[in-house]
Image (cartoon, rainbow, N blue to C red):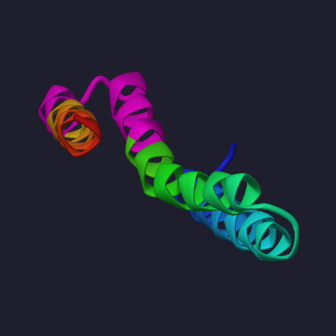
């Protein structure tokens, strides 16, 4: 059985390393690639919340599932408010 905490920490590490590498490459090539790296860095904690929410749903823990859904909703609304 996979330990969920280890899986989530691995996703966070991979997301941060990928974002840093893409951003570094973007500094030497183009601004669009650098922004793609920043976007990956922004999505990394969002993916962590999604994974935790899915884990809580699989465990039928409705309170923590609802909290994770609430956090995702706040992140999405906050992202859209920044764009507009």
Question: Residue shown at 56%/52% (left/top)?
Answer: 39
Q: Is residue 83 magenta?
A: no
Q: In which quadrant of the rendered view does residue 10 lie?
A: bottom right
Question: Residue shown at 24%/39% (left/top)?
Answer: 68
Is 29 on the left or on the right of 77, as rendered?
Answer: right
Question: Residue shown at 15%/39% (left/top)?
Answer: 67
Is 39 on the left or on the right of 28, as rendered?
Answer: left
Where is residue 11 drawn, in percent x and y? 64, 56
Where is residue 27 drawn, in percent x and y? 77, 75
Front residue (pair 82, 66): 82
Is 9 on the left or on the right of 77, as rendered?
Answer: right
Where is residue 31 drawn, in percent x and y? 70, 61
Q: Is residue 76 above or below residue 6?
A: above
Front residue (pair 62, 72): 72
The N terminus - image quarter:
top right
Q: Is residue 19 above or below residue 44?
A: below
Where is residue 61 drawn, in percent x and y? 23, 30
Front residue (pair 67, 27): 27
Which secondary structure dominates the residues rendered in magenta? helix
Front residue (pair 8, 2): 8
* Number of marks: 0
Question: Residue shown at 34%/34% (left/top)?
Answer: 56
Q: In which quadrant of the rendered view does residue 57 lie?
A: top left
Q: Which residues are magenta?
A: 50-67
The C terminus - image quarter:
top left
């Amino acid at each position: 059985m996979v330990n969920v905490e280890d899986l989530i920490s691995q996703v966070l590490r991979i997301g941060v390393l990928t974002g840093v590498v893409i951003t570094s490459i973007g500094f030497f090539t183009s601004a669009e690639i650098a922004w793609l790296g920043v976007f990956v860095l922004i999505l990394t904690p969002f993916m962590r919340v999604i994974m935790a929410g899915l884990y809580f749903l699989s465990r039928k823990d409705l309170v923590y599932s609802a909290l994770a859904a609430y956090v995702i909703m706040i992140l999405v609304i906050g992202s859209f408010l920044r764009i507009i």
